[in-house]
Amino acid sequence: MQCNICEFKLKQFVKRSNDDLLCPNCGSLSRTRRLFNTLTTLPLKGKVLHFSPPQSLSSKLKTISSIHYVTTDFVGEFTTDFHYDITSISADDNTFDIIICYHVLEHIEEDTKAIFELYRVLKPNGICLIQTPFKEGDLYEDYSITSEEGRKSAFGQEDHVRVYSVDALNKRLQAAGFSTNLISATSDSFSGFRNETYIEAIKP
Ligand SMILES: [Zn+2]
């Protein structure tokens, strides 16, 4: 087995209580390794904006000289270049070729506004890779639930404000003008990938 991010060869990934597979060398999660794998299939050029980047992946992407890679995190949980408010991004229209927005929108009350902002700052033909936790059925949001305990029990984490379904997030992306591809990716034990879904949102 091998971590595709840090290239460490290992006997096995570390299984976490939620079944996620951690690289013991760089700390990357399954979805982060899959995301890097997806990125390597794209033309990696131009300006790349990464929201709330895991350090394992941001360190790797910083070494890729064909891209101008910038990172942002609003609340300062991650060390980043910028602290953009995703509902009002301080960047011109049509700035970025690739945007990575993983596990961010489920924290944002005004997610429709955020999605319009992602669309606005993405270049035409640019791609935004998006993932959140997903549930079956319809999405679940209830802004009257504001306590940490209430949110943890309703949405699975104390700072989440909803749980999307794939279809519900897809509809919100399409309503903002994105063309979308829903990708259901399957597990691969060599690379420590798990079954997961993510969305490629393209600005036509
Ligand atoms: Zn690693």
Image (cartoon, grey):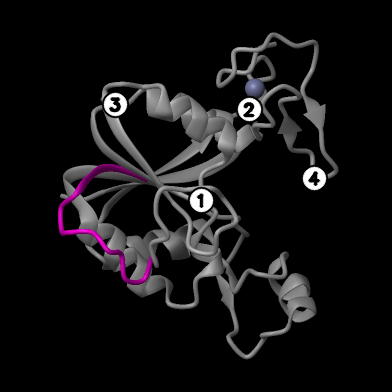
Q: Are marks 3 and 1 in contact (CB under 8 Å)?
A: no
Q: Main secondary structure of the magenta part?
A: loop
Residue type indicated by callout 1? Ser
Mark in front: 1 vs 4? 1
Residue 203 appears left or right of 132: left
Q: Residue at x 37, y 73 (%)?
A: 112
Q: Secondary structure at mark 1?
A: loop
Mark 4 vs mark 3, CA separation in Å: 32 Å
Find the magenta span and give its range.
Answer: 86-99
Residue type indicated by callout 2? Phe
- Local crowd at mark 4 within 10 Å, few (<14), some, or many (≥20)? few
Q: Compare residues 95 and 128 and report the one nearer the observer.
A: 95
Tag of residue 52: 1
| Whether residue 47 can be seen here | yes
Quadrant assignment for ligand 1: top right
Give the percent coordinates (x, y) of residue 97: 23, 41
Residue type indicated by callout 3? Leu
Tag of residue 18: 4
Give the percent coordinates (x, y) of residue 59: 51, 29
Question: How many numbered markers are drawn?
Answer: 4
Residue 196 appears left or right of 65: right
Q: Earlier in the sequence, mark 1 or mark 4?
A: 4
Q: Are marks 1 and 2 in contact (CB under 8 Å)?
A: no
As for residue 7 lying within the magenta part, the answer is no
Vertical side of 17 occupied by 109: above or below? below
Give the percent coordinates (x, y) of residue 69: 34, 36
Mark in front: 3 vs 1? 1
